[in-house]
Image (cartoon, rainbow, N blue to C red):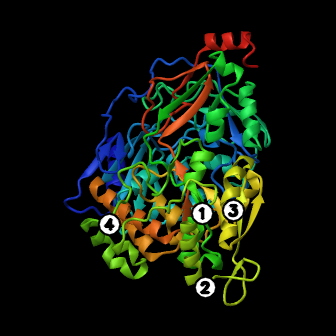
Amino acid sequence: MFIRVLAVILALVLNLGPVAAQDKIIRAHGISTFGDLKYPEGFARFDYVNPDAPKGGTFSTWGFGTFDSLTPYILKGTPAGLATIFFDSLMVGTLDEPDAMYGLLAHTIEYPESRAWAIFHLRPEARFSDGTPVTADDVVFSYEILRDKGQPTYKVLFKDFDRVEAIDPLTVKFTFKPDGALRELPMTAAGLPVFSRAYYASRDFAESTLEPPLGSGPYLLENVDAGRSVTYKRRDDYWARDLNVNRGQNNFDRLSLTYYADYTTAFEGFKGGAYMFREEFSSILWATGYDFPALQKGQVKRESVPDGRPAGTQGWWFNLRRPVFADARVRQAIGMAFNFEWANDSLFFGIYTRTDSFWENSTMQADGLPSAAELALLEPLRADLPPEVFTAPAVIPATSASDKNADRRALREAGALLDAAGWTVGADGIRVNAAGERLSVEMLNDSASFERIMTPYIENLTRLGVEVRATRVDAAEAEEREKKFDFDITTRRYAMSQTPGIELRGIFGSDAADAQGSSNVAGLKNPAVDALIKVIEDAKTRADLETAVKALDRVLRALHIWVPQWYKPSHSIAYFDMYERPNAVPPPNGIGEASIWWFNPDKAAALQAAGAIR
């Protein structure tokens, strides 16, 4: 026995890899970006949950468009909502810490201060839903299959991984490249979804399917109606149901999504009790639609609750792969034709604020002229940056008069930019370049309700001399065209992290620009942007991180890769009065409606007796 234990110890020591003499080895129950953890070892639960929340009932909501797959990690197909719920990861994040993770499949993480590698010690009780154990070899397989057959984004995400190896059945080691984003790479590894090697021995991971996958997560598939609805059922035998990271969570017996091709039709379904929870993203519906009988009778609750996350980067994104958008002045002029002030007054009932930053509603938003600390980062990159990054305040969208038509000043300035870019007005009013090519663009739209916003914008672009084709597609076609970069302008929103890092490579990095299905929908390729992303990844303190993100925000805005839209720092939610939650004010990083809320059977029975729900 002593010899076997000694052998294991020696194996661990030999596999630690090079560690500097001053590099302290950390062994802990969790990890955070900058080292500090809110929850101590042995904590009972997260603060924002109700540890005594009852289990039961169904949480039902809606999905937009359609789906044809239950495999959310590959390029093929359109996955059903919540399909990631089949799978556990080594560690999980929280809703009240922006940059921390705690053990799930792994009870402990071990890493040097340099974060050059990370060892995860798996829980021996971890099981897939068929009862087979989760092993280190399954973790190795998961990394390899995502790298080789997963969405192209994973190749970018794993770029700095050197190797992943099983030390023993319950110990897996990730070794990272020395020049990689070491601060964040152990957390990237910790968030890896874990698949069964044995299960996929007879299945092609890269093929989309509606066969329920084998995972170790808290829910199984109960039923699926392809493209129309999907329901997941909570596992009674879930191996981790009593872990501290899960206490007070996964409270619903079922999670159900009903799909609608049209936003307004989905709202009618909610009013009729076809599903029970809705977060509202339509300002006109929020302002005028919530006066139906169930709400008037108090059977439906309607609330605005704070959203502590960065507002996100919602806007019309240019496909920079198209030659027509090669000149930033063209992109800037097209952006100036959008009259947000009129739209907010006339279409949005004044509830929105114009977005100007990629990190709106956060301390990472660039403002005014660059600080000395920002300039220190930007100066070495001057050759790849617009001069105004150094000489002008951070770009904010042009404002217009609150009139349906963009005011003459805005159109005059936009026209001057197009003239300077070589696009002059032709005999038919459409701008052409020296080669006689027309300034013609296509705008994708996958929502009928969005037409009221796009139509006046397109009218202003037409007045400016831009020929615009508005193409209405369904959600599935829009997703497929975006995957293949087959668009000129499309609408996209990214939820930006409170601790940005390696994920920025996929959204803005050059390596992702030509990878079909990547998140770099704009096709941005800029060495200065890549360099700033690297600085963000390597930041040693939050202050350094915020400085670097501000510099990147300033650069992205100066490049005019999008036409920013709007935001509000709150969630607009409505739900039938059968759901309850732990606190009136949700945690800062999300509502957690499908997990930390719970079902009240007495309230549900009363609603059913009143005919409010089916």
* The quarter of the displayed image where residue 285 is located: top right
Query: Which residue type carries mark 3?
Result: Ile
The residues bearing labels 4 and 2 have C-alpha atoms spaced at a distance of 30 Å
User: Are circles 3 and 4 on residues that touch, CB within 8 Å?
Assistant: no
Question: Earlier along the polypeptide chain: callout 4 or callout 1?
Answer: 1
User: Are circles 3 and 1 on residues that touch, CB within 8 Å?
Assistant: no
Q: Mark 3 Cα within 10 Å, few/some/many (few <14, many 20+)?
A: many
Name the front one of labels 4 and 2: 2
Q: Residue at x 62, y 10 (%)?
A: 602
Name the residue tied to disc 4: 369
Q: Quadrant of the C terminus?
A: top right
Q: Mark 2 Cα within 10 Å, few/some/many (few <14, many 20+)?
A: some
Question: Earlier along the polypeptide chain: callout 3 or callout 2?
Answer: 2
* Residue 485, visible in the rendered structure: no
* The quarter of the displayed image where residue 514 is located: bottom right
* Residue 470, visible in the rendered structure: yes
| Residue 186 position within the rendered picture, expressed as x and y whole percent measured from the top left | 40, 53
Question: Earlier along the polypeptide chain: callout 1 or callout 2?
Answer: 1
Disc assigned to residue 458: 3
Name the residue tied to disc 2: 422
Name the residue tied to disc 1: 317
